[in-house]
Image: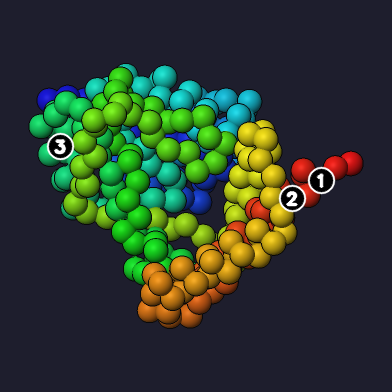
């Protein structure tokens, strides 16, 4: 039977970490956690679950941090999970089965079901939110992106969708959303600036309007009730902010 590791990058996750690890502790071979400078009880909780705990405070972005974390993996397969996620029983069985089959030239994507402001979001373009999270450790790796990092793998690789949901408890409250989205916007603008990109405020307005139309109308966000409307409005705001940030950064001094 091939071995399986859970890998995580974390910072100040004491509120969620135990609940997350409870869903993987009994069926994986190791838990590897790379911390970027927690000041709460994250390390203490991780060690209670016998996790291999490492620290890297030289933050170079999400992609680079995941690359470093993967270097500590000793198992045949790596399964990535965030502290605000939970593995369902159906997904667990699906993961165990494909690891047992041990196929070549395959990576596995997992559908996430997010709960936001007290409601599961099944429309708005949010579900199923398939992301590649499981692969052979020596076969694939994350790219260098500061934010919205993705797994890179050889061409001709088969991407297989697993059954079962990964539950995602993404925002605790509105303040948490605003802080988190501001961080993503900053990283996005910084990444574009490094690539020599510029933006206009008009682009910000058009992309923001496009975001609302796509989420709330085309992706049926109206079926997600008041939370769907709120999400569409917040996403519209976040989209404008990231373009505005890039515009401010690239103005001629």
Which quarter shows the C terminus?
top right
For residue 106, above or below residue 115: above
Which quarter shows the N terminus?
top left
Q: Are marks 1 and 3 in contact (CB under 8 Å)?
A: no
- Dot 2: within a 10 Å radius of its alpha carbon, few (fewer than 14), some, or many (20 or more) residues? some
Image quarter of residue 181: bottom right
Residue behind mark 1: 251
Q: Nearer the viewer, mark 3 or mark 2?
A: 2
Q: Could you tell me how far apart the alpha carbons at marks 1 and 2 are, in whole angstroms?
A: 6 Å
Q: Could you tell me how far apart the alpha carbons at marks 1 and 3 are, in whole angstroms?
A: 51 Å
Labels 1 and 3: the sequence-earlier one: 3
Q: Are marks 1 and 2 in contact (CB under 8 Å)?
A: yes
Labels 3 and 2: the sequence-earlier one: 3
Q: Which mark is residue 172?
A: none
Residue appearing at x 17%, y 33% in the figure:
99
Q: Which mark is residue 98?
A: 3
- Dot 3: within a 10 Å radius of its alpha carbon, few (fewer than 14), some, or many (20 or more) residues? some
> Which one is in front, 94 or 107?
107
Q: Nearer the viewer, mark 1 or mark 3?
A: 1
For residue 70, above or below residue 113: above
As drawn, is 93 to the left or to the right of 200? left
How far across and down, in percent of the image, does residue 228 sit?
A: 46, 74
For residue 242, above or below residue 102: below
Residue appearing at x 32%, y 51% in the figure:
130
Residue appearing at x 22%, y 54% in the figure:
164
Report whether residue 88 is seen. yes
> Which one is in front, 1 or 102?
102
For residue 170, above or below residue 65: below
As helix, strand or loop, the secondary structure at mark 2 comes to: helix
As helix, strand or loop, the secondary structure at mark 1 comes to: loop
Image quarter of residue 78: top left
């Amino acid at each position: 039977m091939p071995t399986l590791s859970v890998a995580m990058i974390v910072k100040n996750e004491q509120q969620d970490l135990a609940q997350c690890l409870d869903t993987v502790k009994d069926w994986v071979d190791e838990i590897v956690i790379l911390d970027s400078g927690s000041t709460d009880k994250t390390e203490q909780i991780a060690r209670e679950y016998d996790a291999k705990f490492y620290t890297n405070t030289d933050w170079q972005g999400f992609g680079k941090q995941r690359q470093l974390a993967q270097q500590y993996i000793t198992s045949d397969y790596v399964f990535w999970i965030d502290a605000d996620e939970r593995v369902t029983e159906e997904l667990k069985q699906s993961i165990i089965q494909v690891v047992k089959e041990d196929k070549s030239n395959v990576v596995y994507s997992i559908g996430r079901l997010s709960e936001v402001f007290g409601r599961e979001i099944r429309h708005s373009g949010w579900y199923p939110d398939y992301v590649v999270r499981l692969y052979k450790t020596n076969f694939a790796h994350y790219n260098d992106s500061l934010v919205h990092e993705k797994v890179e793998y050889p061409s001709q690789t088969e991407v297989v969708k697993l059954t079962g949901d990964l539950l995602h408890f993404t925002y605790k409250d509105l303040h948490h959303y605003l802080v988190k989205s501001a961080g993503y916007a900053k990283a996005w603008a910084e990444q574009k600036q490094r690539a020599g990109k510029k933006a206009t405020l008009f682009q910000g307005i058009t992309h923001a309007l496009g975001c609302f139309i796509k989420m709330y109308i085309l992706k049926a966000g109206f079926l997600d009730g008041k939370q769907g409307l709120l999400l569409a409005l917040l996403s519209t705001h976040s989209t404008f902010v990231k373009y505005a940030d890039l515009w401010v950064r690239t103005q001629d001094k």
